Image (spheres, rainbow, N blue to C red):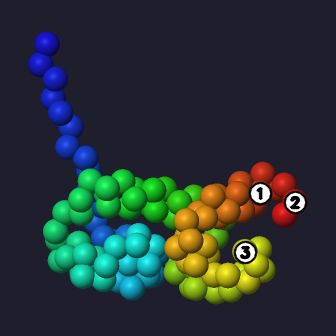
Amino acid sequence: MIQIKKQPSTISIPAFCKRYHLVRNDLSRLTQYSPRAVAKWVAGDTPSAAAQKQLKELVRLFDALCNVMETNYIGKWLKTANPAFDNSTPLQVIERGEADRIWHMIYQLETGEPM
């Protein structure tokens, strides 16, 4: 039996940033990769496997956010202090490795569970 190894699909960084109204610096902060690495991705370089995995997780998170808010508001929301996160911005929450707090917020909003 011949097995065909499927290549991992790459994320279009410019399309992702445009869709969610993000600038390169935002993506650098979200991924913890350098601005230079992000600039290379925007220019068409393929991110490393580890970076691709992280980017896929971001896409999954942002797609889930689209279920609870307007897509074009996500970029602004990321940079706005939020009482649900002790007045940290969601971007700061993600930077600290606490994206699970955002996932929990999404769950609460989708299920109607009190916050």
- Disc 1, disc 2: CB below 8 Å? yes
Q: Earlier in the sequence, mark 1 or mark 3?
A: 3
Residue visible at 56% across and 71% down in the picture? 96
The residue labelled by disc 2 is 114
Q: What's the residue type where badge 2 is placed?
A: Pro
**Residue 16, horizontal then vertical, whole percent:** 37, 70
Residue visible at 58% across and 85% down in the picture? 79
Question: In the picture, which quadrant includes the C terminus?
Answer: bottom right
Q: Judge by depth and name the residue closer to the eye, 99 or 115.
A: 99
Structural distance between the alpha carbons of marks 3 and 2: 15 Å
Is residue 88 left or right of 96 when viewed as pictured? Answer: right
**Residue 46, horizontal then vertical, whole percent:** 19, 63
Q: Secondary structure at mark 1?
A: helix
Is residue 105 left or right of 63 when viewed as pictured? Answer: right
Q: Residue 108 got which mark?
A: 1
Residue visible at 78% across and 51% down in the picture? 111
The residue labelled by disc 3 is 85
Q: What's the residue type where badge 3 is placed?
A: Phe
